[in-house]
Amino acid sequence: MTYKKQTTLAHGGQHQGYHEEATGAVNTPIYLSSTFHQKQLNELGPYDYTRSGNPTRTQLEKTIASLENGTDGFAFSSGMAAISSAFMLLHSNEHIVISKDVYGGTFRFVTQLLSQFSISHTFVDMTDIDEVARAIQSNTRVIYMETPANPLLQITDIRAIVALAKENNCYTYLDNTFMTPLHQQPLDLGVDIVLHSATKFLSGHSDIVAGLAVTKDNSLAEKLSFVQNTYGAVLSVQDCYQLIQGMKTLEPRFSKSTRSAQQIAEHLSDHPAIENIYYPGLASHPGADVHASQSTSPGAVLSFELKKGIDVQQFANDITLPVIAVSLGAVESILSYPATMSHAAMPVEEREVRGISDRLFRLSVGIEDVEDLLEDLENALNQTTAVNLYT
């Protein structure tokens, strides 16, 4: 029987009345062992050393593979470890086409580390298919997408990019952190590798750092498995267990946060202190229709730009409910300042080209009462040292 995503999540990837046979435990056991006894010298068992594999990690990896409709899942020590490992499938003198609207850590890895291996890159406006096509070279190996993109929530037409990649014999990678497999299925749309910072919505509690990757076919799985084992940036057993537990409540957490995000975005879109609002759930968002065609939720993250004259530090000082911090996707709302947080690794001139101004904030909406969040935002906006905004 095929189960819905919510059911798979709620059971931690286990179905049919699963329980651990020896004790009847309904939770995946934590196998705290670095090594495993081998009965035969010339024939190793399924596990030999935890870097190469562990039963707890296996359960997590099977679960994310099932949720993404992929062949194999891989758990890494961070989202960047997952992304970096996927890029390690490239060879010297190959080329990447990558969205210019990309997480700052990915920008740093591509521009400062991959270049050391003679792997070149071209940043493009991934919403412009013609620009993507013009950027493809004879040695282009990967087209890298992030949709919705961080932090301006630009939307990439996944199907169009996949078609372009296939025409040019390229792989496609997609960072699915903002949507999760609950609401966006990139592999079903033809993407080759889907990536997650599982620190965010999948975990949901700001308590672990983790990354996940899922492959479309066995050939890619074999290659990524080699990198995972060789590179060694695997997720610890305790964190694997904790991530499985966090994923069990993804659907109710994400659904509540999305409902609240929609209300907040609609409220802020008419606010006199707001210059721009970025949220794919608004009809005014330029990528709203494309997003609706490939995702089943507008998501729980929005960004907004304050009008000139508002003291951004005073606004942050007056906010009381959202924590002001790096990261997103938690039960508590998190207000981030991309210029010094998620995109601090990006030079000022690069941020300006991308529209990431010093007046931009990103809000990851949690599960608090939405009326409390709205009141808090309204109070903070009204108390800022603005230059005659309301007269």
Image: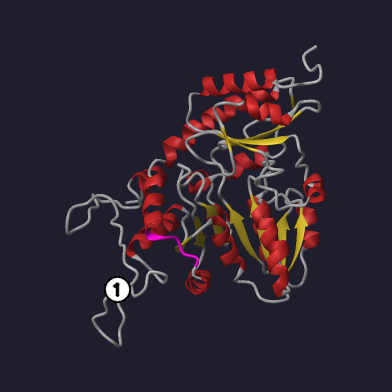
Q: Is residue 130 left or right of residue 325?
A: right
Q: Quadrant of residue 270?
A: top right
Q: Residue at 60% x, 42% y: name it.
A: 293
Residue 161 position (above or below residue 150): below
SS type, badge 1? loop
* Residue 103 rendering spot, x and y as whole percentages: 66, 51
* Residue 358 rendering spot, x and y as whole percentages: 76, 38
Judge by depth and name the residue closer to the eye, 247 or 296: 247
Q: Which residues are magenta?
A: 233-237
Residue type indicated by callout 1: Phe
Q: Which residue is mark 1?
A: 36
Question: Dot 1: within a 10 Å radius of its alpha carbon, few (fewer than 14), some, or many (20 or more) residues?
Answer: some
* Residue 265 rendering spot, x and y as whole percentages: 63, 28
Q: Is residue 176 left or right of residue 8?
A: right
Q: Residue at 42% x, 70% y: name it.
A: 51
Is 344 contained in the magenta span? no
Q: Is residue 364 left or right of residue 381?
A: left
Is 235 contained in the magenta span? yes
Q: Is residue 301 visible?
A: yes
